[in-house]
Image (tube, rainbow, N blue to C red):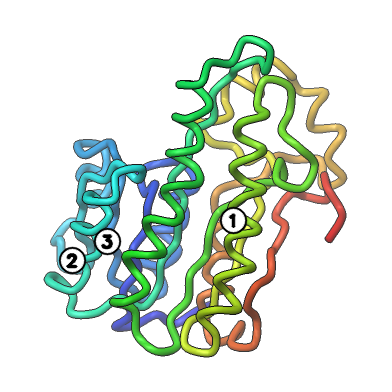
Amino acid sequence: MFDFSQRVLLLTGANGGIGRGIAREFMAAGARVVLADINEAGTADFARSIDPAGAHTAAVRLDAGNSADVERAVELCSRRFGRLDYLVTAAAIFEDHPFETMTDEQWRRTMTANLDSVFYACRRAVPAMKQGGAIVNLASEAAHTGGSPMHSHYGATKAGVLAFTKTIARELAPRIRVNAVSPGTINTPMVARWLEQHGPAYIDTIPMRRLGEPKDVAQAVAFLCSDAASYITGTTIHVNGGGYVGA
């Protein structure tokens, strides 16, 4: 569907469920992909599974909330593949913490992993990116509806991602386009426990009557990076099966 031949993607959160789907989509379209994730061994295994010869991927350990790690990942793009065209920020955590007992440390950990990390990645990647490049930040349905109970910190970070995306889209145009994707409930390990608690009845609340799959998100991300979206910047695509309908 898309042609990313000779293009290079830096993907944070690459070993997560959505991250793996994005990596596969870009690889299928011919991209070189730098897979960055805090799970170093798992990311290396995943890289071998989609690129046994290792010609089109590179795996690197990345604590997305550590700016020095981000700098090393950006440098790897240039050193290994000679360029950087696309940045997709998919690193995030989703922890259960009721607001009334949430500690400062719990709040700060989610802020660092989900929002600071997006700033670090964009700030370090942009100087290395080619003219016509694209950034896609992963937000969430929670950014628009508010976080579900016990996830006020998560909802706040994802709303911050949206505002940040819109602002830098104006600053970086026309050289680099910046957009966001807001997934609904996607069938990944990160939300498995939450789905167990809510059960099959939850699916009946989704107009499409199914959970989203990583590929659904990956295709939206690929579209926003592609030339088909060359006049789109500062916007958000919702991938939620109709669970939330709004601006």
Compared with residue 13, is residue 217 higher up or lower down, i.e. above or below? below
Q: Which residue is mark 3?
A: 34
> Dot 2 corresponds to which residue?
75
Q: Could you say where residue 102 lies in the image, as x and y percent from the top left?
A: 59, 16
Expressed as whole percent of the image width and height from the top left, the position of residue 178 reads 55, 72
Q: Do the CB atoms of the residues marked 3 and 2 lie less than 8 Å apart?
A: no
Quadrant of the image occupied by residue 96 = top right
Residue at the spot x=41%, y=48% of the render?
117
The answer to whether residue 189 is seen in the rendering is no
Where is residue 229 drawn, in percent x and y?
61, 82
Question: Which of these two is toward me, 216 or 143?
Answer: 143
Q: Which residue is mark 1?
A: 217
In terms of image quadrants, where is residue 112?
top left
> In this rendering, which labeled residue sits more in front, label 1 or label 2?
2
Q: Please indicate, yes or no, whether residue 18 appears anywhere in the rendered image.
A: yes
How crowded pointer 2 is (Cα within 10 Å; few <14, some 14-19, many 20+) is rated as some
Q: Earlier in the sequence, mark 1 or mark 2?
A: 2
Give the amino acid type for the residue marked by disc 3 in the picture.
Val
Which of discs 3 and 1 lies nearer the camera? The answer is 3
Query: How far is disc 3 from disc 2 in space, using C-alphas?
Result: 11 Å
